[in-house]
Image (cartoon, helix red, strand yellow):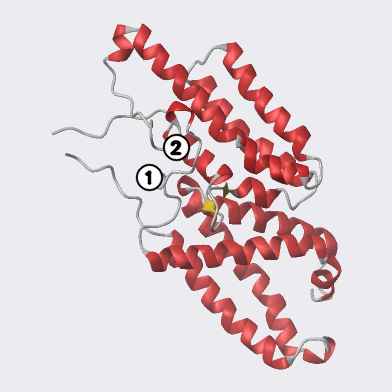
Amino acid sequence: MTTEPHDPLRGARQLAVLLDGAWGIPFTRWRIGVDSLLGLLPVAGDLLSALLSLSIVWQGHKLKAPKHLQARLLGNIALDFVVGSIPIVGDIADVALRKNQRNVALLDNWLKASAQSDPVAADQPVASKTGRGYGGGNLSGSSNMSILPDSKLRAAALLFVFFWFFAGGLGHFFAADFFAGIMPDYLPWHYPAVYISGVFELVGAFALLYPPLRRWAGIGLFVLTLVVTPVNVHMWLNPQDFPDVSEAFLSIRLVVQVFLLFCIWWSTQQPISKPQVA
């Protein structure tokens, strides 16, 4: 009986696919990831993207990658941050440069070279991803590094939750006046609460797409949804205070709230599958 070879870069590979190539653009060979979505947030999005990318550099540090290689990984992130700050050009650069997959490929090549030069290390099984979107300089997305549940229904529910909180999180920044205006008067600090909850929604949405964090992200978003439910109930009970919103919409919103809670829990709180034994 043997187990699958250990891949020290497994988590880094999954994160790189999530950030650089999670979704294919129809009728093209191009792929986009969370990095491209973060580009919608000026400056803050580029900063968050750089912070997420640093986890791959940290993985290289834990593997004791040479200092010059770690410096090169940091250089790729810095270059993407500078270029990414340029409107439009930065969004195109995120798709073209794919810094995270490039950094994983650099670490992968270093590990293979180290294994070939060290007979002891060569005897240790390391999963090779050549031909799966990383080895040999191939930086395309990989279907073998799935970020979605195997069940199509669970995947659809997860994507629904992701886009709900991604759109809502952006709305907290671009329509802050609206969200502050619907908060009950008895709650203090309306605008800080709007911005803070917006940050939590965006962070939670992106964490949903990273399998190791999915369960905790689901718990956090479930609790967050429960916390904001009184605001929706307040709107439903006081429709006269919101003349621009129909009463039918307010009622439907509560039903959707219940459905959202179900989707959050059902799509995120599933057992983590164990590696198969051959």
Q: Amino acid at mark 1?
A: Asn
Q: SS class of the residue under badge 1?
A: loop
Q: Which residue: 53% across, 48% down? A: 29
Badge 1: residue crowd in 10 Å (few <14, some 14–19, many ≥20): few
Does the CB distance between marks 1 and 2 fall below 8 Å? yes
Residue 205: % across, % down = 59, 56
Q: Which residue: 30% across, 14% down? A: 122
Q: Is residue 36 left or right of residue 66?
A: right
Residue 55: % across, % down = 57, 32
Q: Mark 2 or mark 1, which is nearer the start of the sequence?
A: 2
Closest to the observer, 119 or 246? 119
Q: Which residue: 55% across, 52% down? A: 28
The label on residue 33 is none
Question: Which residue matches tag 2?
Answer: 133
Separation of disc 1 and disc 2 at Cα? 9 Å
Closest to the observer, 200 or 34? 34
Residue 141 visible, this angle: yes
Q: Is residue 130 above or below residue 227?
A: above
